[in-house]
Amino acid sequence: MGSPMAQNLIKAGCDVTVWNRTKSKCDPFISLGAKYRSSPEEVAANCDVTFAMLADPESAIDVACGKNGVLSGMGPGKGYVDISTVDGATSKMINGHIKATGALFLEAPVSGSKKPAEDGQLIFLTAAGDRSLYDSVAPLLNILGKSRFYLGEVGNGAAMKLVVNMIMGSMMASFSEGLLLSKKVGLDPNVLVEVVAQGAISAPMYSVKGPSMVKSHYPTAFPLKHQQKDLRLALGLAESVSQSTPIAAAANELYKVAKAYGLSDEDFSAVIEALKAKSDDSA
Ligand SMILES: NC(=O)C1=CN([C@@H]2O[C@H](COP(=O)(O)OP(=O)(O)OC[C@H]3O[C@@H](n4cnc5c(N)ncnc54)[C@H](OP(=O)(O)O)[C@@H]3O)[C@@H](O)[C@H]2O)C=CC1
Ligand SMILES: O=CC(=O)O
């Protein structure tokens, strides 16, 4: 996700500096004219605003607060925008450390996958006490996304993102059951995809991913391991306010099975494989 975003900023003429743990992934952007720095600290020290797009809470904390991390390069007049999908506690913790340096912080998780990221069509769910940073990076968010929501206090962006992805994970698990059931009772699952697309339960996700799921192809847009991470974090959020979420809990178990089958880096639609395996077990 960080790659297409960096590419769009460069194409729009922004002065972009890149860093990634695996350096080779920076090479295409250096070829396009981006500068390279050898640590998050150096990026932060040399840029007015630093964007981070990281896998999970652990990597977000490590890159922000770890050795040679963003914190060491932050200070008054600078801003840090974390786009990674994390939980509210992680976001608040990073916010606290960044603010202590005199810099400003925004949490800004996004909805939308690889293609929307390439097309600059992401939906930004941004939240922070730092409205001034939100306003000053708005032109950059407009390059990367098609819409943005300012949600107030830090933690609200993370919560909104987790609720959305909790729904998405359950939808995909349910769709997978439907595809397999239709096939087992002698229907053509391709026709099911078309029927679903015409009615009230239509969703771009079903139309885009359904045809390849029928062919057992799962080209990765949103890695399955991240969908399971988001369900896990959403269940934690639900637990924190005693909200019952039995559907999401069942979906989470399915994604865990899919991970155990080695499908972590496949697209999250590969969760259907866990159901195929379960059906085989009971046959
Ligand atoms: N893919 C999607 O459709 C969407 C994803 N998201 C969220 O965006 C985030 C990124 O997703 P995506 O790009 O798909 O994920 P990837 O797994 O493709 O990329 C993860 C990035 O995090 C880096 N990283 C992982 N662990 C560490 C670490 N310990 N220290 C430093 N860097 C680390 C990776 O570096 P390296 O290259 O070295 O491995 C890589 O740059 C996730 O939080 C995901 O939930 C949100 C919306 C859509
Ligand atoms: O977080 C994933 C997405 O597609 O949005």
Image (cartoon, grey):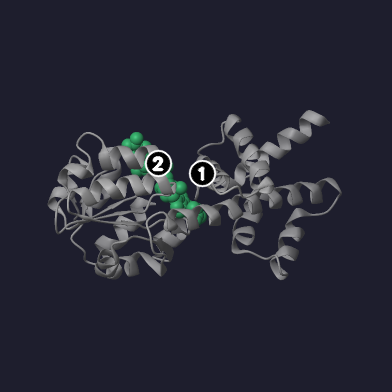
Q: Amino acid at mark 1?
A: Leu
In the picture, the disc for residue 57 is 2
- The foreground one among 213 and 152 is 152
Rendered residue at 40%/42% (across/down): 55
The answer to whether residue 78 is left or right of residue 200 is left
The answer to whether residue 283 is left or right of residue 65 is right
Q: Position of residue 247 (x, y in %)?
A: 68, 48
Ligand 1 within 8 Å of the CB at mark 2: no
Q: Secondary structure at mark 1?
A: helix
Q: Secondary structure at mark 2?
A: helix
The answer to whether residue 160 is left or right of residue 13 is right
Cβ atoms at labels 2 and 1 below 8 Å apart? yes
Q: Report how far apart the C-alphas of labels 2 and 1 lie in the structure.
A: 10 Å
Q: Position of residue 157 (x, y in %)?
A: 43, 58
Rendered residue at 80%/51% (across/down): 182
What residue is disc 1 on? Answer: 233
Q: Image quadrant of residue 7? A: bottom left
